[in-house]
Image (tube, rainbow, N blue to C red):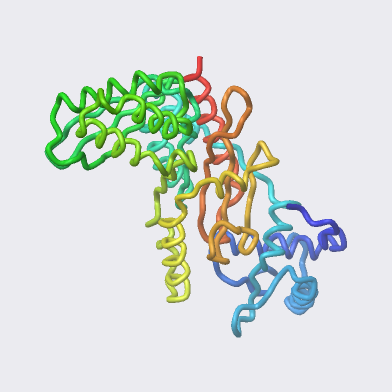
Amino acid sequence: MTQQASPLGDLTSRSREVFRLIVESYLASGEPVGSRTLSRSLSEGVSAATIRNTMQDLELLGLLNAPHTSAGRIPTQLGLRLFVDGIMEFDAVPLPDRAELDRSIDGNESDLTGAIERAGAMLSGLTRGASLVTAPKLEAPIKHLEFVSLSAERALVVLVTADGQVENRLMTPPPGMTPSAMRQAANFLNAVLEGHTLSEARSIVSREITKNRAELDTLSQNLIESGLAVWSDDMGKGSRLVVRGRANLLEDSASSADLDRIRQLFDDLEQKRDLEQLLSLTEGSAGVRIFIGSENKLFSLSGSALVVSPYMNAERKIVGAVGVIGPTRLNYARIVPIVDYTAQLMGRLVNSRSH
């Protein structure tokens, strides 16, 4: 994502320092930065008039702009990109944060779904943004499937894969469902699906139902078809999105324009269930990627930033992603290492279940 010819290379040491101070102040406060504030922070004594001239030069380069009638400046999208790529120094993940992440994710090998939920909650808490975590693709062969009756109108479909993943889906069983029909349906599915992946299930089951129609009663057939239907989205896309911490996005959004952008982002988050798009953002890179403003094609909100990293299985294949989304003035120096570390833990967790 770096630029071919960076304007940073043409900056004097003073211009570079002014630019750095403006961006760091903006990321911390969200407010425009004026020449008087800068004159108190510069390492060398420089007049406010000289600083204003420097700010104008940076504006001409497209690195800064002046919002409304403010005398101060804020970084442009290009300015933020160049700062992140060329100036910013990333913090190490603090030891207490590492310990919290380790406890929430690394030690829960038997509870992958819970670990994903905890990873999302921990990420949003540590970064004060909204976290995005995708569940690993269900590519492992099916080991076992069963139906659990909860009431006359609700049942649970439980799927266990050969690598130990357990996924649950709620469904509405066909009217008049009996315990014997549930057992027959589960026995049939386990007999024909064991050793096959979820993406292969529909064609296999359709073929086997036709072949064994005389042996299956109508209720069992209906339950099999209803049970498979609840997995239809996963068969096509293979991922689930867990979003946590939406409320964090509202904390610093005082203006109506900010609130409108946040509402739009909420709508986008609700609609983005096709996580192949999120995973595609991580292609070609094993590490963290940062998308600022209009670089972020996944969400329509141009005023957002996304920090995202893939996590991989033992074969080094991308199976999921971890990310944080928020306003463009995210604390990148802190968030990028946390996202990277969380992705490493998720990869370690997935790998531990395949042995």
Q: Is residue 9 left or right of residue 87?
A: right
Looking at the image, which residue sits at the far top?
A: 355
Compared to residue 170, the image places residue 277 above or below, namely: below
Compared to residue 278, the image places residue 110 above or below, namely: above
Q: Is residue 341 left or right of residue 47?
A: left
Q: Residue 201, how many percent across, how many down?
A: 43, 31
Q: Residue 74, how many percent across, how many down?
A: 64, 70
Q: Quadrant of residue 262?
A: bottom left
Counting labels gives 0
Q: Residue at x 52, y 41 (%)?
A: 322
Q: Residue at x 21, y 29 (%)?
A: 217
The residue nearer to you, when weighing 195 against 355, is 195
Q: Is residue 43 left or right of residue 114?
A: right
Instruction: Say whether residue 47 is visible.
Output: no
The residue nearer to you, when weighing 100 against 258, is 258
The residue nearer to you, when weighing 270 against 32, is 270
Q: Residue at x 71, y 64 (%)?
A: 78
Q: Residue 245, how many percent across, how many down?
A: 40, 51
Instruction: Say whether residue 252 is visible.
Output: yes
Q: Residue 16, how many percent across, how many down?
A: 78, 61
Q: Quadrant of residue 147?
A: top left
Q: Residue at x 39, y 19 (%)?
A: 143
Looking at the image, which residue sits at the far bottom?
A: 69
The residue nearer to you, when weighing 122 against 95, is 122
